[in-house]
Amino acid sequence: MVLESTQVFQRNTAARGKVLQAIERQTGHFTAEDLSQQLPGVGRATVYRTLGVLTRSGYLCKVLLGGNTLHYQVSPEEHHHHLVCIECDRIVDVESCEVADYARETALAQGFQLQRHRLEVYGRCPSCQIG
Amino acid sequence: MVLESTQVFQRNTAARGKVLQAIERQTGHFTAEDLSQQLPGVGRATVYRTLGVLTRSGYLCKVLLGGNTLHYQVSPEEHHHHLVCIECDRIVDVESCEVADYARETALAQGFQLQRHRLEVYGRCPSCQIG
DNA sequence: ACATTAATGAGACTGAGTCTCATTACGGCG
DNA sequence: CGCCGTAATGAGACTCAGTCTCATTAATGT
């Protein structure tokens, strides 16, 4: 997803540009604090605010990992599949998606306007099965 | 899922019994603080610790809602499907599951031992579509 | 009944996230 | 271009969910 920032923000500022650049540099999941530390010139509050705006707009999504800190990641196109290890919190991304049809029907059945869906499969990863 | 507490805890204590009872009284999602307030006789730390144990054991699972506070809910048998409104955070539970096979295959393909899966479908709920 | 040690709970502590408010600067308009 | 309204900023105070500590209590095996 290429972000057309004018659609999301009311004004285009230097600070938000830097936050967006930093997000693009991330690989996988990151926290607000990660970003903030990588952006000494940008206020912490601004980082949090920008993440909020981007999440509400759908560009980012929240991810729930083992700890209690909120993680973010750039939303995959429409769906978003993970294998999560319940032992070590390792995450493997899953490319394929055979759930899209079912997600659409489910949303429709309740009158929801579908935006996207996410499947998380929990289990024990190969290395944690040894213990 | 009926919890055989001796399997999860090393000792059966009054405090944990009360926490379990309180969890059974909850309908849907709840936070650690919710429980703590309903259990004046039980220390806050104990509530948090017990929730941790129960989550690790699979009896509870974490749920990510709109705010930043962690919510819990009793794990449905094996899977766990939600329609989440991106506007108002309303959650509709979905009973049916046509994803189980796919989840099993996906886990297997990466050598994961499947424990359970969760599908979350995001969209705008009927009342939020009006605005 | 006793010893071992898991579990408790009061309260201090941490740190993620929010709020406030004076200041800055984006962008529309004359 | 310069002006204005107001969105956005950022320093820092604040909140409160969640963790840790440690002295005390009590569940279990023998």
Image: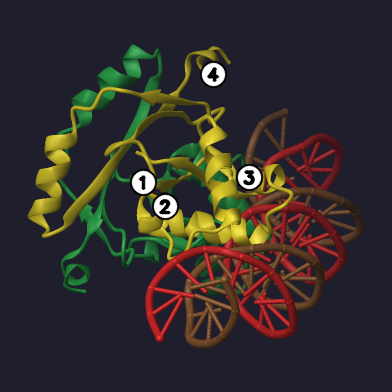
Chain colours: A yellow, B green, C red, D brown
Question: Mark 1 = which residue?
Answer: B75
Are the residues at dot 1 and dot 4 in contact (C-beta closer than 8 Å)? no
Q: Earlier in the sequence, mark 3 or mark 4?
A: 3
Q: Amino acid at mark 1?
A: Ser
Closer to viewer: mark 1 or mark 3: 3
Q: Disc 1 and disc 3: Cα gap in Å?
A: 33 Å
Q: Earlier in the sequence, mark 4 or mark 2?
A: 2
Look at the picture and state if B71 lies above or below A27: below
- Which mark is on residue A128? 4
Compared across the picture, whether A59 is left or right of B44 comes to left
Res A42 quadrant in image:
bottom right
**SS assignment at label 4:** helix
Q: Disc 1 and disc 4: Cα gap in Å?
A: 22 Å
Question: Mark 2 = which residue?
Answer: A5
**SS assignment at label 1:** loop
Q: Disc 3 and disc 4: Cα gap in Å?
A: 30 Å
The residue at the point 42 percent across, 26 percent down is A123
In the picture, the quarter occupied by the N terminus of chain B is top left
Res B126 quadrant in image:
bottom left
Are the residues at dot 1 and dot 3 in contact (C-beta closer than 8 Å)? no
In the picture, the quarter occupied by the C terminus of chain B is bottom left
**SS assignment at label 2:** helix
Q: Disc 4 and disc 2: Cα gap in Å?
A: 42 Å
Q: Amino acid at mark 4?
A: Cys
Label 4, residues with CA under 10 Å away: few <14, some 14-19, many ≥20: some
- Which mark is on residue A35? 3
**Same-subunit check for callouts 3 and 2:** yes
Q: Amino acid at mark 3?
A: Leu
Compared across the picture, whether A27 is left or right of D11 comes to left
Look at the picture and state if B9 lies above or below B106: below
Q: Disc 3 and disc 2: Cα gap in Å?
A: 18 Å
